[in-house]
Amino acid sequence: MINWLRRLVYYHVMEEADSTIEKCLILADFFIDCALKSKIIICFARCCIFLWAMCLHLSAAGQSPEALAMMRNGLINVQDADPNIVVKLMYAEADNFVGESMYGTLREAMLQPEAAEKLTVASNNLKKKHPRYSMIVYDAARPRKIQQIMWNKVKGTPKSRYVSSPKRISMHSYGVAVDVSLLDENGLPLDMGTPVDYLGELAEPRREQEFLKSGKLTRKQIDNRLLLRNIMKNAGFRSISNEWWHFEACTREEAQRKYLPVDFF
Ligand SMILES: [Zn+2]
């Protein structure tokens, strides 16, 4: 860069000046010109930074403080990734197994970018197969403090096997797990045989065939679960054997290696 500048100055001066004074004047003129140009460049850079800051401000407008805190840690709002995805966080309302709202003002489903990207693929594939159906997210990134509250509620009861101990950090706390279902053309949840977050055996995919035979689940309910599972698995998610609504975007080892748990609120 310096050599390039030297060469530029040399040719500029030597080609156009005859006397030493004239050379000095041309040289001074050259540096004044450079200074003015650099001011223009600085001014242009400042405008770019200002516009970028405005874009950031506008994209953050309307987001809850909890969502903004997660965004600063690299998570993204799934509805920013795909506005077709419906979000209704079950732990932001009192109608959940704990019986109280635990999410403060958080109403956004936040995920690590790789999980949000896979969910967008799943949503697009659903729209191709059933254009009037939509995905609904009931839970996504879950701070560890909330996991502790949930654990305290079920600890020592048979329901404890449906809730991760805070010692073994939940995949939700890494921002890579999502609780989802499907909405029909009227915006109503498809019948999956149990409500989401039903803490009982009827929610377990591993026992679906047994419950089909005993009549506790219908063929249609199982087909609806299979539709959800296929859509999610084809997008790269992994299912689990005891909750039909829970899916993970990577293995626990990968999550531990790549991410810190969501640990603020
Ligand atoms: Zn879950």
Image: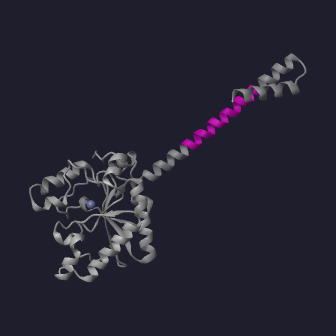
Screen quadrant of the N terminus: top right
Q: Quadrant of ligand 1?
A: bottom left
Q: Spot the residue most to the left.
A: 156
Count of marks, rendered view: 0
Camera sees residue 101: yes
Which residues, given as a range, are shown in magenta?
30-49
Residue at the spot x=36%, y=69% of the render?
135
Q: Is residue 196 above or below residue 259?
A: below
Left or right for 155, reference 63: left
Magenta span main SS? helix
Q: How is the image coloured?
A: one colour
Q: Nearer the viewer, residue 58 or 15?
A: 15
Residue at the spot x=58%, y=39% of the render?
46
Left or right for 175, reference 218: right
| Residue 49 lies in quadrant | top right
Q: Is residue 115 above or below residue 131?
A: above
Q: Nearer the viewer, residue 253 or 148?
A: 253
Q: Nearer the viewer, residue 166 or 54?
A: 166
Q: Is residue 141 above or below residue 86?
A: above
Camera sees residue 189: no
Residue at the spot x=45%, y=69% of the render?
124
Residue 183, percent from left and from top: 34, 74
Q: Is residue 6 magenta?
A: no
| Residue 198 lies in quadrant | bottom left
